[in-house]
Image: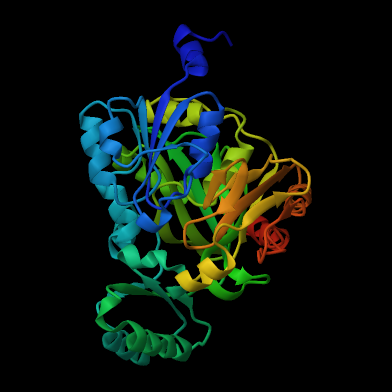
């Protein structure tokens, strides 16, 4: 097909990108956008994370002073929705959320009610303001539950607890422990009924009017240790693939298309679900980049990521050019991850060097790093060093590429999961049998 002048301009233009980051998580995207020939400036809000990205891209202290310079502003996290809307009203090109999508993610009760309003089946859940009422509720309604913190505290992923006791006794014990350690500072939380099945996410980019194809199907590995043992970390790794259509998408996210347009959303949105032979049960929204999802998606996208973000934010309608097969990624982390402990971080991890046995950096995504004299050093305070990705026509091919790349890297005291992607072989059989692939 012959390209129009406008399409050629978009493909060849070099632009000014201003990245607004909560914790520096979008360093890899900003750095890659710069390597593609664009000018990039990065602002990081969190003070302990301020060193992240130093030496990779230009850092700024006050992002508002650079708005006029920017051709596009990219927000990498939830909570900036009101600012995004103000900038869009001022005719800036913005990739980011809205007040509505902020609420979908941060206010779990709101998210569940919106799902019901859009005729999406949800699991029973109840919101609580204190532990005493929650414990009383479980005793009156014995069952398996999941504890889900709400608001900003949900970023402490180790606080999410998935119960296994059919009478809820394990959840009661955890709530009692939280009451002793957190008191009244915990804030709102949700108890959600637990069901067994396959945990799978469906996500898509949204250009302000409609979802762009293909869709992304993602399988997260959240526990610290292999075979889903240990504390919840948010994520240790992910496997994924792209599809033109999905029964899960049609039953859930697709129903939000008009609402997202009405509420001025332009960005990426993900809905995590539990699915089984009885149905599809949405768990929670992520209405921004997923981490590490976006890095692994980048490994599977066949066009410059900066160009992609600009076209989406500019309201372009197009099909994303992606690799066939599978993409996979694993975090390499260091102490005290997944916990916060400044003394441990300073003792074992701060300024540790990332060493490459061979100078091969394809599929290596810098996370909480700084670049000093061409040496990659760990900084920040959480201990997330790198995300390593791999791709392949089969899941085993993608795994092999990723773990070969991991074996090329030495980071003192580091650890990572050795089973990312293994779940796919059993999960895919179940999904096929339920008609969900």
- Measured as percent of width and height from the top left, residue 18 is found at 38, 33
Residue 337 appears in the picture as rendered: no
Query: In the picture, residue 154 is in which quadrant?
Result: bottom left
Instruction: Say which of 34 and 329 sits in front.
Output: 34
- The residue shown at (51%, 30%) is 34
Query: In screen coordinates, is 218 left or right of 413?
Result: left
Instruction: Say which of 52 and 337 sits in front.
Output: 52
Residue 151 appears in the picture as rendered: yes
Q: Check the image and name the residue furthest to the front.
A: 373
Query: In screen coordinates, is 298 left or right of 269?
Result: right
- The residue shown at (49%, 46%) is 203
Instruction: Say which of 331 and 423 sits in front.
Output: 331
Query: In the picture, residue 133 is in which quadrant?
Result: bottom left
- Measured as percent of width and height from the top left, residue 227 is found at 67, 72
Q: Is residue 435 above or below residue 325?
A: below
Q: Quadrant of the N terminus?
A: top right
Q: Is residue 364 above or below residue 352?
A: above
Query: In the picture, residue 16 is in which quadrant?
Result: top left
Query: In screen coordinates, is 220 left or right of 259?
Result: right
- Measured as percent of width and height from the top left, residue 45 is found at 34, 50
Q: How are the colours assigned in the image?
A: rainbow
Query: In screen coordinates, is 197 left or right of 284?
Result: right
- Measured as percent of width and height from the top left, residue 402 is found at 72, 50
- The residue shown at (30%, 31%) is 66
- The residue shown at (37%, 26%) is 315
Marker count (numbered): 0
């Amino acid at each position: 097909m012959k390209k129009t002048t406008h399409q050629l301009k978009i493909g060849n233009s070099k632009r000014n990108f201003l990245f607004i980051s909560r914790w520096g998580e979008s360093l890899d995207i900003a750095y890659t956008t710069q390597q593609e020939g664009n000018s990039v400036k990065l602002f990081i809000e969190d003070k302990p994370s301020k060193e992240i990205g130093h030496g990779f891209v230009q850092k700024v202290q006050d992002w508002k002073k650079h708005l006029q310079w920017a051709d596009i502003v990219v927000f990498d996290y939830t909570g900036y929705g009101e600012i995004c809307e103000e900038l869009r009203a001022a005719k800036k090109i913005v990739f980011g959320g809205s007040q509505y999508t902020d609420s979908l993610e941060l206010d779990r009760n709101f998210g569940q009610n919106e799902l019901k309003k859009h005729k999406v089946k949800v699991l029973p859940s109840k919101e609580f303001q204190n532990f005493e009422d929650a414990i009383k509720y479980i005793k009156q309604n014995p069952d398996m539950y999941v504890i889900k913190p709400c608001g900003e505290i949900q970023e402490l992923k180790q606080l999410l607890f998935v119960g296994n006791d059919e009478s809820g006794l394990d959840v009661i014990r955890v709530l009692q422990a939280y009451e002793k350690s957190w008191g009244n500072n915990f804030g709102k939380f949700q108890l959600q009924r637990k069901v067994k099945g396959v945990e799978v996410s469906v996500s898509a980019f949204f250009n302000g009017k409609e979802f762009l194809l293909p869709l992304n199907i993602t399988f997260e590995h959240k526990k610290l240790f292999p075979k889903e043992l240990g504390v919840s970390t948010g994520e240790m790794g992910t496997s994924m693939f792209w599809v033109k259509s999905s029964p899960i998408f049609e039953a859930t996210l697709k129903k939000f298309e008009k609402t997202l347009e009405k509420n001025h959303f332009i960005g990426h949105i993900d809905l995590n679900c539990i699915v089984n032979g009885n149905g599809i049960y949405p768990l929670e929204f992520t209405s921004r980049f997923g981490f590490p999802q976006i890095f692994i998606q980048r490994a599977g996208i066949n066009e410059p990521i900066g160009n992609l973000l600009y076209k989406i934010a500019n309201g372009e309608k197009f099909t994303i050019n992606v690799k066939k097969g599978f993409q996979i990624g694993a975090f390499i982390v260091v102490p005290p991850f997944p916990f916060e402990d400044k003394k441990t971080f300073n003792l074992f991890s701060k300024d540790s060097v990332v060493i490459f046995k061979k100078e091969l950096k394809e599929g290596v995504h810098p996370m909480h790093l700084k670049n000093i004299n061409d040496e990659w050093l760990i900084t920040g305070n959480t201990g997330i060093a790198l995300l390593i990705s791999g791709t392949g026509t089969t899941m085993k091919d993608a795994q092999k590429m990723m773990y070969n790349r991991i074996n090329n890297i030495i980071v003192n005291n580091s650890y990572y999961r050795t089973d990312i992607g293994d779940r796919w072989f059993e999960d895919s059989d179940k999904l096929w049998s339920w008609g969900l692939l």
